[in-house]
Image: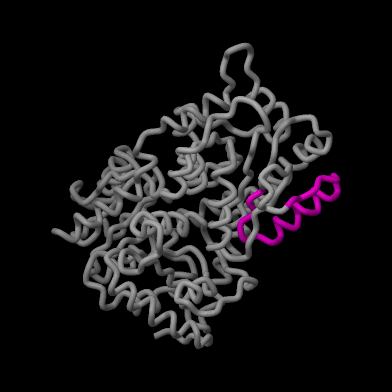
Amino acid sequence: MPDLLDPVLVKTFAKDKQYLEDTKLPIITVSASFKEDIKGFHGLPEDETIPDIVFSRAHYSMAVGIASQAWGKTMDYKKAWIVDPTNYVSHGDWKSIQLTEIIGKTLARHRYLKLLKDSVDKFGRNRLPILDSITPPLLHLTQHIKRPILSLHIATGNILAGLGKTVLQVITDPHVRYDYLIHAEKANMFFCVFDQKTKQDLLEKAALIDKKVDPKRIFVTGPPVDPRVVGIRKNKKAWRSGPLKLCITTGGLGTNKDEILQLLAHLLPELRRHRPDYRLIIYTATHQDISTAVGKLAKSMHVKISPIEDRRAKLRIIYHPQIVDANELLITYGFPWADGFITKPSGDMAYDAVAAGCFLLTLQEWGEWEYVIREIFETKGISRSAVIDQIAIQLATLTNAEGKAQSWVELAMLNAHKIDKLFLEGSRQIIATYQGLKQR
């Protein structure tokens, strides 16, 4: 039992443990410390102003996407429940959580540290300082669970599989890290993978390190996307004329901060001159520093930042100090509204944007998997690389259409609407795979 100073968290810890034991679909991830929202989940008072420590939107949003598929319209712990052991790290170990976030943000926000990041990737996520800290609460939470556990993070899957738990590990990207293969040969380790090529990559890499993996324990499901995001595409029409609505986004660690500010340095003067007909939402996630920087830049260029509820505004910001609320704001105000997203080709934002029927302009990739994601959507005619220092010219070109011809933007959105079902039904397929495991 971890040493938790907050007496309310002692109560939620016990409830989360019971819910995981009782639910039909126990989901474990490592993404953030959303302690206050956990209190709200259990009907207890919460403080909306306390900032979360965040490592990844993807590991949170994808877990929520799967749970939403199981829940339907109302959260129901009997159908599915998500727990992140980060929330229950002992007080004495909390510095390791803070250190992990600092390392992640430092690497994610500075291009010249890219080589260091690559070294960290090779060193392995299973050796980062957070690992020893999350293990005690993770073991306590799952000690009595007999059914398979759905894991959305490499670390949790490996810890649990190493203890003999049956694990269904979701590999969310079209890329297989060697970390995923630590227990891949064991009969209690199962995988959901992005596509057939990812399955083949897993088998090939396992063979290269002399691990025999049964292909029957690898299931092609597609990426997990929130069904609420998928449902948005039904009411979205491909852009042809009028204001072009763009959502510019960062991620859980504030990646691409410099690129986002450079984009705005070129776009905001255009907004002030009323010349191009486009509108912007900047998703700064849980990052106060990025939100403040955007605000200062807009003020210096005399561009008003409007309330998020004003759908006709020229410039809005989505910011919340807590990941749960920031994610919900993006689903409410970002995906339904935007024609296109300017984002790094990450395995959450890019999937979600395309599932919502949007086109993509991609920022600098941050990891091998993002090069693959960019290539996938470029091949499908949905995405192009953003030219930051000439973004206004690029947007004008991509929206231009002569006569009855369609612009690239319109064609890209139509292509997003025709995307393979693999990119839309991952959450449903993962749940179906899990249910199949229970029947074995």
Q: Within the magenta stretch, is there residue 287?
A: yes
| Residue 123: % across, % down | 46, 58
Q: Is residue 216 left or right of residue 3?
A: left
Determine the image quadrant of residue 23.
bottom left
Q: Is residue 419 left or right of residue 169?
A: right
Viewport quadrant of the N terminus: bottom left
88 is higher (above) or lower (below) than 82: below
Q: Within the magenta stretch, is there residue 383?
A: no
| Residue 419: % across, % down | 41, 33
Going 53% across and 63% down the picture, which residue do you hit? Answer: 324
Of residues 240 and 399, the one drawn nearer to the viewer in this rendering: 240
| Residue 118: % across, % down | 52, 51
| Residue 152: % across, % down | 38, 58
Viewport quadrant of the C terminus: bottom left
Q: Is residue 156 visible?
A: no
Going 61% across and 47% down the picture, which residue do you hit? Answer: 249
Residue reaching furthest left? 440
Q: Which residues are magenta?
A: 282-306
Q: Is residue 110 visible?
A: yes
Going 58% across and 47% down the picture, which residue do you hit? Answer: 334
Q: How is the image coloured?
A: one colour
Determine the image quadrant of residue 286.
bottom right
